[in-house]
Amino acid sequence: MLKLLLQLFFVSFCFISGGYNIKTGPGCMIELMKFDMGGSAAVFGAAKALGQIKPLGVEVNNTDAEGRLTLADALVYACNQGAEKIVDLATLTGACIIGLGSSIGGVFTPSDDLAKEVFEASEASGEKLWRLPLEESYWESMKSGVADMVNTGARPGSAITAALFLKQFVDEKVQWLHIDMAGPVWNEKQRCATGFGVATLVEWVLKNAS
Ligand SMILES: *[C@@H]1O[C@H](CO)[C@@H](O)[C@H](O)[C@H]1NC(C)=O
């Protein structure tokens, strides 16, 4: 913005200074100084184009909820690559630890078919999962005054609103399932990672890869 203001100021100063030619001599490019508004023109042009493209605007009102932003990028990428089914795993929310404790991962998905596949895999692997609702009415707390959404909503139901946030970035034609594994990722007693999710994913891929 500062650059834009300086550009505008400079252009005004040069051409409204009462007839003084402060650029003289060969190569001074006085006749080309129309292009000196190029920087501000580029900023205005970009603002106009973005206004027409209307990219999804997210207000980051919690910098500690950054994982879901990179996960959103990954989901968009996977959809663009033509994925038919996506299972994401993330230690996404403290709320899921509070809700399900350290032995159970939370599952969120609009797809009953994909849920069935993944739950069958988790029964074979022995890793415990529990399906939680994608309650659309909770999206209300994710509304923003300045963008399409904020990146964290109110504290109640925040594992659900986190999943709803991810859902915004998944193509509706793609089957998508999100596992919030913030609880079972860590073995508190042994102070080590559990590897939760590996066995279920392997089972799922082996059973369903065609
Ligand atoms: C982010 O916005 C939501 C919805 O307005 C609000 O409930 C929440 O408290 C905000 N989070 C922070 C860290 O300000």
Image (tube, rainbow, N blue to C red):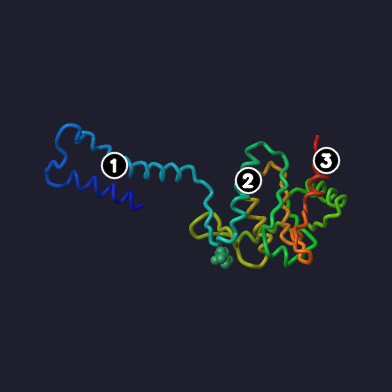
Q: Ligand 1 falls in which quarter?
A: bottom right
Image quadrant containing the C terminus: top right
Which image quadrant is residue 28 in? top left
Indicate which disc residue 83 carries.
none
Image location (x, y in percent) of residue 181: 73, 57
Residue that mark 3 sits on: 206
Image location (x, y in percent) of residue 129: 80, 56
Dot in front, 3 or 1? 3
Density class for disc 3 (Cα within 10 Å; few <14, some 14-19, many ≥20) is few
Element marked by disc 3: helix
> Which of the marked residues, 3 or 2, is nearer the chain's N terminus?
2
Residue at 62 percent across and 38 percent down: it is 80
Q: Is residue 21 found left or right of 180 in the rendered image?
A: left
Q: Nearer the viewer, residue 114 or 17?
A: 17
Q: Is residue 37 found left or right of 149 in the rendered image?
A: left
Image location (x, y in percent) of residue 12: 22, 47
Residue that mark 2 sits on: 74
Q: Which amino acid lies under the numbered mark 2 shown in the image of this protein?
A: Ala
What's the distance in space between the residues labelled 3 and 2, CA to CA? 23 Å
Element marked by disc 1: helix
